[in-house]
Image (cartoon, grey):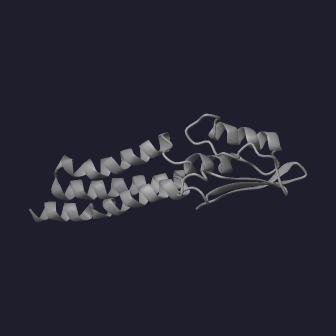
Amino acid sequence: MTRRVLAGFIQLPLLLAAAMLAVTVDWAGLTPWASWVYVGIGLVTGALACSLSRRISSLSPSAALVFAVIFFRLVDVSPVQPAIRAVSRIRVGMTENQARRILKDEFPPGGRFTPLRIADPITSGYLSFVLDPRNGKYNAAVIQVGFVHGRVASAVFLAD
């Protein structure tokens, strides 16, 4: 009985990890590195809980966390996810057309998450737009691509 209680106690960090996963996806996207951290937490706590309780059912909470990570890597639930991907794909030295093509790939016209001003012209050397001005969660999250002489000089995502 005490082994099962201890196994349950070991899995308490999974609750924190699950809450942090939701915040991470919505605020900063889910990077590959962060994905591995969450999967590692799930695997370690699952292995410890299963070895203590000697029940395969002890793996259920850990498996749920790992499947949630996989789900969030495959499905965009927030405009932050394609924003992070776009910024990571845009490289210094690219032309404006190349950068816009990447943005269009990640935010297709008529897609689930299409920023209103993504097609605006460059002003003051920057292509800059808010992810979703109509949604309070994303109305201050900005993608900013800086250009010098028609080439990308910087690309950043500024979280809300």
145 lies left or right of 125 = left
Residue at screen point 37% across, 44% down: 67
Q: Residue furthest top?
A: 110
Residue at screen point 72% across, 47% down: 90
Q: Residue furthest left?
A: 1
The C terminus lies in quadrant:
bottom right
Question: x, y percentage for residue 108?
Answer: 64, 36
Question: Where is residue 19, by image quadrant?
Answer: bottom left
Question: x, y percentage for residue 156?
Answer: 69, 57
72 lies left or right of 84 = left
The N terminus lies in quadrant:
bottom left
8 lies left or right of 144 = left
Residue at screen point 31% across, 52% down: 62
Q: Nearer the viewer, residue 118 or 48?
A: 118
Q: How many marks?
A: 0
4 lies left or right of 16 = left
Establish if 103 lies above or below 135: above
Establish if 114 lies above or below 40: above
Q: Residue furthest front?
A: 134
Question: x, y percentage for residue 93?
Answer: 82, 49
